[in-house]
Image (tube, grey):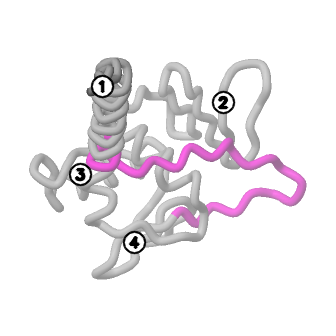
Amino acid sequence: MQVLTETPRMAFGDVTIDVDSRRVRAPGGACNLEPRTFDLLMTLAERPGLTASRDHLIETLWSRDEGSHGALNKTVADLRKALGDDDQAPRFIETVPAIGYRWIYEAAPGSTPPAQRWSLGPSWVAVGAMLAIAVGGAASVGAYAWAQDDDPPPRAVAAR
């Protein structure tokens, strides 16, 4: 895979993806990818050779409550169609039975891989945001308490 420098593009052999517009140009034609279909492409292509489990992909692309295996199957089928890929003789996306999917396209020697984006999914983003709020809140309370910590002046003890 090679990244072309003039605009953010990725190329996989005879397939080119314009990252900004999410537009795919393949021998079978050009089309715009739906946001989740594009996110699936990025999730798989950024980790070539590694299998992404179905559950990981559902959580990454939707959330555990919104996504389903049927929705993932449709999204994979849409991506395969846009890339001109075939599930029986895949060039890009391999189905790993009972586990998930794997990006199998092998770039020509000397080409540049895309920048890593390692998405951990919506649930990890939410957990990170809550952690940041909790730490910030605790720091604010501590700073306020420290600023208000005025010891009363010592009392003078009169000698008898």
Residue, disc 2: 9
Disc 3 or 4, which lies upstream in sequence? Answer: 3
Per the model, the C-alpha gap separating discs 3 and 4 is 13 Å
Of labels 2 and 3, the one closer to you = 2
Please provide percent x and percent y for residue 109: 87, 60
Q: Which mark is residue 102?
A: none
Q: Is residue 44 above or below residue 153?
A: below
128 vs 26, nearest the viewer: 128
Q: The residue tagged with tag 2: helix, strand or loop?
A: strand
71 vs 121, nearest the viewer: 121
Question: Which region of the structure is painted magenta?
Answer: 103-125
Q: Is residue 144 left or right of residue 2?
A: left
Q: What residue lies at 52% left-to-right and 32% top-to-bottom?
A: 24
Are the residues flagged by discs 2 and 3 in contact, CB closer than 8 Å? Answer: no
Disc 1 or 4, which lies upstream in sequence? Answer: 4
Would residue 150 be visible to someone looking at this image? no
Please provide percent x and percent y for residue 57: 33, 57
Per the model, the C-alpha gap separating discs 2 and 4 is 25 Å
Disc 2 or 4, which lies upstream in sequence? Answer: 2
Residue, disc 4: 95
Q: Is residue 133 magenta?
A: no
